């Protein structure tokens, strides 16, 4: 519905030999919209799963693919906005679920209330307009009127001017739908590549795909005092099928942590 197949399909075809078919008339907006006029039914992963399950039920396919994005503060750098993309593959016959993920601070995600056309033009410029689309509405949680997918300067000016005349201000947002946001498309491409990596990463015991990290344990010792820090000491790989586990020590290639990260040496 939002043309994500433009970046997903070539990767799956080239790397896995999977041919992607987009079902006609499938309304993915029923699972939530970025403009919040339709709420998302659950968390990001749950929503992606619901999309894939709907395809399997409606078209009686064996394998379904779904993508879901979310935008907000970065998990490690909360002062930065980030784009978190999931690409989920659901294999009904083998009861297999694999999820590719990409997190990027390279996003134009933003909103702003404006009171003049100059403010609107400034917001549009910093948002990458017109290559990136915009949304105009009366306020953050008002959905009538709601203009989406604005990529024309004249249309942007008309929508903003209408609201300025009616109420003295307008609410502008970046349109985060993939076909109006080429920056987001790049992150979806990265999530698809991560999915391919996980499919190829098989269990050393039973060769099931998706042998991936399920946990990380801190405790990397300080280079000065040897006390444990919050640095990652080991990560745990687990098979979805046979539950075989492998513990990898020093996954970042470091056997000690910088003393500046030590609660004893640098409290």
Image (spheres, rainbow, N blue to C red):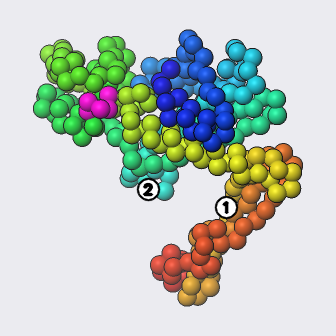
* Residue found at x 65% / y 72%: 250
User: Which of the pair 179/79 is nearer the observer?
Assistant: 179
Total marks placed: 2
Judge whether 190 appears above or below 245 on screen.
Answer: above
132 falls in the magenta region: yes
The residue singled out by tag 1 in the image is 216
Q: Which residues lie in the magenta part? A: 129-133
Label 1 Cα crowd, 10 Å radius (few <14 / some 14-19 / many 20+): some
User: Which of the pair 15/31 is nearer the observer?
Assistant: 15
In the displayed image of the protein, which residue is found farthest to the bottom?
224
260 falls in the magenta region: no
- Image coordinates for residue 128, horizontal then vertical, percent: 27, 37
Question: Do the numbered discs 1 and 2 sit on residues whose CB atoms are within 8 Å?
Answer: no
Q: Main secondary structure of the magenta part?
A: loop
* Residue found at x 50% / y 39%: 188
| Mark 1 or mark 2: whose residue is earlier in sequence | 2
User: Which of the pair 169/173 is nearer the observer?
Assistant: 173
User: Which of the pair 12/122 is nearer the observer?
Assistant: 12
Label 2 Cα crowd, 10 Å radius (few <14 / some 14-19 / many 20+): few
What is the number of the mark on residue 63? none
Judge whether 75 appears above or below 250 on screen.
Answer: above
* Residue found at x 44% / y 19%: 37
Measure the alpha-carbon separation of dots 1 and 2. Answer: 19 Å
* Residue found at x 19% / y 30%: 120
Residue 209 visible, this orientation: yes
The residue singled out by tag 2 in the image is 77
Judge whether 207 appears above or below 52 on screen.
Answer: below
Q: Give the structural element (helix, strand or loop) at label 2.
A: loop
Q: Give the structural element (helix, strand or loop) at label 1.
A: strand
- Image coordinates for residue 165, horizontal then vertical, percent: 14, 16
* Quadrant in the rendering for residue 245: bottom right
């Amino acid at each position: 519905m939002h043309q994500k197949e433009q970046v997903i399909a070539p990767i799956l075809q080239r790397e896995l030999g999977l041919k992607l078919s987009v079902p006609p008339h499938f309304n993915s907006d029923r699972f939530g919209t970025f403009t919040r006029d339709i709420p998302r039914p659950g968390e990001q992963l749950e929503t992606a799963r619901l999309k894939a399950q709907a395809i399997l039920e409606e078209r009686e396919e064996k394998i379904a693919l779904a993508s879901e994005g979310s935008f907000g503060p970065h998990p490690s750098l909360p002062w930065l906005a980030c784009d978190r993309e999931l690409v989920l593959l659901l294999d009904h016959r083998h009861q297999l679920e694999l999820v590719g993920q990409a997190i990027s601070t390279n996003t134009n995600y933003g909103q702003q209330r404006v009171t003049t056309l100059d403010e609107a033009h400034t917001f549009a410029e910093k948002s990458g307009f017109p290559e990136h689309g915009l949304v105009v509405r009366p306020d953050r949680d008002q959905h009538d009127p709601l203009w989406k997918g604005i990529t024309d300067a004249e249309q942007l000016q008309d929508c903003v001017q209408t609201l300025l005349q009616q109420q003295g201000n307008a609410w502008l947002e970046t349109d985060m739908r993939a076909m109006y946001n080429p920056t987001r498309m790049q992150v979806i491409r990265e999530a698809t590549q991560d999915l391919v990596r996980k499919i190829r990463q098989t269990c050393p015991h039973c060769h099931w795909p998706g042998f991936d990290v399920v946990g990380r344990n801190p405790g990397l010792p300080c280079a000065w005092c040897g006390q444990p820090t919050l640095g990652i000491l080991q990560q745990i790989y687990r098979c979805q099928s046979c539950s075989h586990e492998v513990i990898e020590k020093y996954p970042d290639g470091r056997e000690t942590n910088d003393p500046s990260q030590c609660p004893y040496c640098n409290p």
